[in-house]
Amino acid sequence: MQHRTSIVVAHRLSTIAGLDRIIVLDHGKIVEDGTHQELLDKNGRYAALWRRQAGQKQQRKDK
C-alpha cells in the first residue's frame, strides 16, 4: 500500500499492527495516534487493548 492513504477499521489489532500510522478513536474523537510501537510505549488505550487481545490468544492456546 505504498504511496496511498487507506482507512482501515479493525477490531483485531494484529490486522493493523504493521501500518505506518494508527489512529485510535473513542466515541468519535482521536485519543491516540502513532505507530504500533509508539502506541504500546504510551501505555494508553491501544496498549491495553493489545494486551487484552494477546491474553485472549494465549488463553485459547492453553486450552
Image: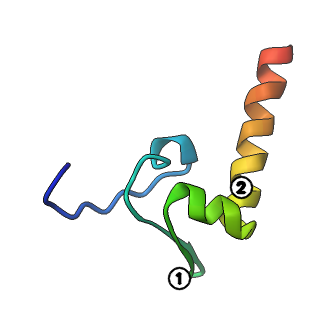
- Name the disc covering residue 17, or none: none
What's the colour scheme? rainbow
Q: Which residue is mark 2?
A: 49
Q: Quadrant of residue 59?
A: top right
Name the residue located 69 percent from the left edge and 70 percent from the top edge: 42
Mark 2 residue type: Leu
Q: Name the residue nearer the viewer: 52 or 18.
A: 18
Residue plotted at (13% across, 59% down): 3
**Mark 1 burial class by Cα count in 10 Å: few <14, some 14-19, many 20+:** few
Label 1 sits on residue:
30
Where residue 33 sits in the image (x, y, percent)?
51, 74
Q: Secondary structure at mark 1?
A: strand
Residue 44 appears in view: yes
Locate residue 15 relative to residue 51 in the image: left or right. left
Image: 50 above or below 55? below
Residue 56 horizontal/vertical position (percent): 78, 35
**Between discs 2 and 1, the one toward the N terminus:** 1
Give the structural element (helix, strand or loop) at label 2: helix
**Residue 12 visible here:** no
Amino acid at dot 1: Ile
